Amino acid sequence: MAGKIPDLEVTARTGTGKGAARQARRDGLVPGIVYGGGEEPQAINIPFNVLLKRLKAGRFLSTLFNLKVEGQEDVRVICRNVQRDVVKDLPTHIDLMRLKRTSVVSLFIHVDFINEEECPGLKKGGTLAVVRPEVELNVIAGDIPESLTADLSGLEVGDTITISDIKLPEGAKPTIDRDFVIANVAAPSSLRSAEDEEADEGEETEAETEAAAEE
């Protein structure tokens, strides 16, 4: 999730029950429900094409949205379920949950890399190999960061940045319980090629030595 929390625009659905849901689908809408947050559940509709685009973009179930309903205050929600047609595999209903500021949710947070100009490894021709452009965190809804910051200052070729090198928001924890790699400064391609050639030559010399010994 880079930048601000994305908006999810829906409309309030006046009718309830199967009849209203069928009518919504005939009108090119996907019916849904918004619940939680200490408030009454609310029936909604979302345009089919809008929802399908969001689903195809990926990670819909782990993205925090700013729910916008005309005439109501915006509220933060996360999708808890998407029902699909068993034959066409297209969305037929969604469940959205309101979040309190103290709620803990799992979200993917974008990683920004700073101070490339102060990275000796990059100055020597190395390249930044990003392993995880996003990191999944368990984070408090009221303290969700726009991004995480990875500092490249002082890194040499071969150095790595792990999750322990990144300052996380108060109360946030990675969903992976180990010190995993975020990125590394890889050697220049020319240097890697030279090393590969040296390794190949070493293997050939060793093979020739072994052959001579057998003779």
Image (cartoon, rainbow, N blue to C red):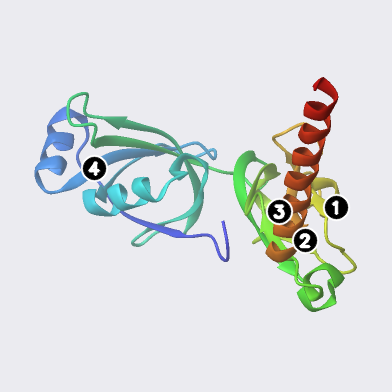
Above-or-below relation of 49 to 203: below
Q: Are marks 2 and 1 in contact (CB under 8 Å)?
A: yes
Give the structural element (helix, strand or loop) at label 4. strand
Classify mark 1: helix, strand or loop.
helix
Identify residue for label 3: 143
Gap in angstroms between the C-alphas marked 3 and 4: 31 Å
Comparing 183 with 27, the one in front is: 183
Residue at far front of view: 215
The structure residue drawn at horizontal position 80% and vertical position 40%, both measured from the top left corner, is: 205
Give the x, y percent position of residue 32: 31, 39
Q: Earlier in the sequence, mark 3 or mark 1?
A: 3
Eye-nearest disc, 4 or 2 = 2
Residue 17 shown left or right of residue 4 in the figure: left
Q: Which mark is residue 30?
A: 4
Image quarter where the C terminus lies is top right
Residue 69 in the image: x percent, y percent? 36, 57
- How far is the residue under mark 3 from the one under mark 1? 20 Å
Residue labelled with disc 1: 165
Q: Residues within 10 Å of mark 2 (few under 14, many from 20)?
A: some
